[in-house]
Image (cartoon, rainbow, N blue to C red):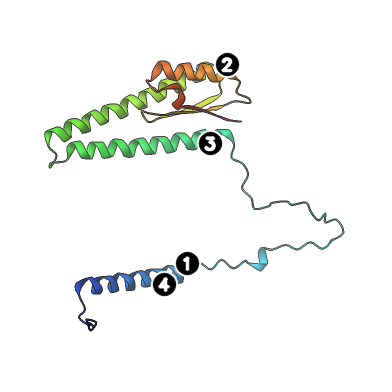
């Protein structure tokens, strides 16, 4: 039988240091976090228990469903932020000093593709709004199209007209087009 080696290597030292750093980070996070104990001064108690109807639930802290306007505003902000990050990444890749000419050409083509997708999304949104929908947000990734429209009820004819707009503007196959409605 072999005797176990007691020699401590670099890997063991690194793993021990990382484990200790993780433990310290968890402790600091726990110690610095605010305590979430309920404040009894902000609690109210009911005096009349006769009017309580058991079995009926009322969620007082449940978040209300966001309004459709809030959804579309948030969706536009998220989409703009994601696009800005993609453009910034592509600009960094194109402007990088250690990029070969072939990689620079590929990155430039990617940047052109992103700009075409952004332009197509804007055109689709405008055309769908022109069809009489209150609001619209389009998401394109080259292979799939997702369109969210604000409407009280989407019928087959309206869905078909939206699909025709997308098919006319992009080269995405019809089976990869999804249409969602927000009321």
Q: Residues within 10 Å of mark 4 (few under 14, many from 20)?
A: few
Is the residue marked by circle 2 packed among few (<14), some (14-19), or many (20+) residues within 10 Å? few
In which quadrant of the rendered view does residue 86 lie?
Answer: top left
Comes first in the chain, label 4 or label 3? 4
* Disc 2/disc 4 C-alpha distance (Å): 59 Å
Residue drawn 64% across the image and 50% down it? 62
Q: Position of residue 96 (x, y in %)?
A: 16, 41
Q: Is residue 133 left or right of residue 89?
A: right
How many numbered marks, from 0 up? 4
Rendered view: 101 above or below 24: above
Query: Element at badge 3?
Result: helix
Secondary structure type for disc 4: helix
Q: Earlier in the sequence, mark 1 or mark 3?
A: 1
Which mark is on residue 86? none
Of discs 3 and 2, which sits in the foreground?
Answer: 2
Q: Which residue is mark 2?
A: 157
Q: Nearer the viewer, mark 1 or mark 2?
A: 2
Tell me where residue 165 appears, x and y as whole percent.
46, 17
Give the residue pinned by disc 4.
27
The answer to whether 148 appears left or right of 99 in the picture is right
Judged from the image, the secondary structure of the residue bearing numbered disc 1 is loop
- In the image, what residue occupies the spot 73% across and 51% down? 58
Q: CA distance from mark 1 to mark 3?
A: 31 Å
Q: Which mark is residue 33?
A: 1
* Residue under the point 84% across and 61% down: 49
Q: Quadrant of residue 124?
A: top left
Quadrant including the C terminus: top right
Give how far apart the Cα atoms at labels 3 and 2 are: 25 Å
**Closest to the observer: 45 or 139?**
139
Residue identified by numbered label 3: 71
Asked whether the residues under the numbered discs 4 and 3 touch, taking CB atoms below 8 Å apart as contact, a structural biologist would say: no
């Amino acid at each position: 039988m072999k005797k176990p080696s007691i020699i401590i290597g670099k890997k063991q030292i690194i793993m021990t240091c990382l484990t200790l750093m993780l433990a310290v980070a968890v402790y600091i996070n726990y110690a610095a976090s605010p305590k979430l104990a309920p404040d009894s001064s902000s609690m109210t108690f009911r005096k009349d228990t006769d009017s309580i109807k058991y079995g009926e639930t009322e969620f007082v802290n449940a978040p209300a469903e966001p309004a459709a306007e809030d959804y579309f505003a948030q969706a536009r902000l998220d989409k703009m932020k994601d696009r800005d990050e993609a453009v910034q990444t592509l600009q960094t890749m194109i402007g990088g000093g250690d990029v070969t000419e072939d990689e620079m050409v590929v990155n430039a083509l990617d940047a052109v593709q992103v700009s075409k997708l952004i332009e197509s999304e804007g055109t689709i949104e405008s055309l769908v709004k022109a069809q009489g929908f209150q609001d619209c947000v389009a998401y394109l990734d080259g292979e799939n199209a997702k369109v969210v429209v604000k409407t009280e009820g989407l019928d087959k004819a309206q869905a078909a007209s939206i699909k025709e707009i997308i098919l006319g503007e992009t080269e995405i196959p019809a089976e990869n087009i999804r249409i969602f409605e927000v009321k």
